[in-house]
């Protein structure tokens, strides 16, 4: 029979686990998608979308929309330093001492990863 004898703390743990697992899967999917999209294609599509926006709403409204989006981007990624720390965490610098890991920074995968971050974070 169904009863209400479950401890409320146990139910919170299940919800917490569900939210954390869902968030991790979302981030992994985002990173996989970002890794597969070519940077030059992303820039071309960005320019085409901008031209379509200007044509659809006019240059004055398009500027207002872009200004608002830039403000949101600044508030979400720049002011919180998320963009800065993403680069710092994911991209090694050959000039910064890293306890013997400096030669790793010469690997050709890092410029590719920088292109992925530039595309994902919109800092082209």
Image (cartoon, grey):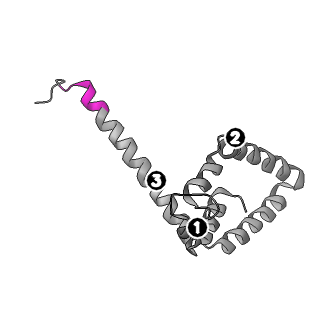
| Rendered location of residue 97, percent (x, y) | 58, 57
Q: Which residue is mark 3?
A: 26
Query: What distance separates the C-alpha of mark 3 from that of mark 1?
Result: 19 Å
Dot placed on the residue nearer the N-terminal end, 2 or 3: 3
SS at circle 3? helix
Crowdedness of circle 3 by 10 Å Cα count: few (<14), some, many (20+)? few
**Label disc, if present, on residue 113 of the rendered structure:** 1
Asked if residue 7 is among those painted magenta in the image, a careful observer would answer yes
The magenta-colored residue range is 6-12
Query: What distance separates the C-alpha of mark 2 from that of mark 3?
Result: 23 Å
Circles 2 and 3 in contact, beta carbons < 8 Å: no
Crowdedness of circle 1 by 10 Å Cα count: few (<14), some, many (20+)? some
Look at discs 3 and 1 and give the one toward the viewer.
1
Query: What distance separates the C-alpha of mark 2 from that of mark 1?
Result: 23 Å
Look at discs 2 and 3 and give the one toward the viewer.
2
Q: Residue at x 69, y 45 (%)?
A: 78
Q: Is residue 118 above or below residue 27?
A: below
Circles 2 and 1 in contact, beta carbons < 8 Å: no
Quarter of the figure that contains the C terminus: bottom right
Quarter of the figure that contains the N terminus: top left
Front position in the image: 1 or 72: 72
Front position in the image: 95 or 25: 95
Q: Which residue is mark 2?
A: 79
| Rendered location of residue 7, percent (x, y) | 21, 25
């Amino acid at each position: 029979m169904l009863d209400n004898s479950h401890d409320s703390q146990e139910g919170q743990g299940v919800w917490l686990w569900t939210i954390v697992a869902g968030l991790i899967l979302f981030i992994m999917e985002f990173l996989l998608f970002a890794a597969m999209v070519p940077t030059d294609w992303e820039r071309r599509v960005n320019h085409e979308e901008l031209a379509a926006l200007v044509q659809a709403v006019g240059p004055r409204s398009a500027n207002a929309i872009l200004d608002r989006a830039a403000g949101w981007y600044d508030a979400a990624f720049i002011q919180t330093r998320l963009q800065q720390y993403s680069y710092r965490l994911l991209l090694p610098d050959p000039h910064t001492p890293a306890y013997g890991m400096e030669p790793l920074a010469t690997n050709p995968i890092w410029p590719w990863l920088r292109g992925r971050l530039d595309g994902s974070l919109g800092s082209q």
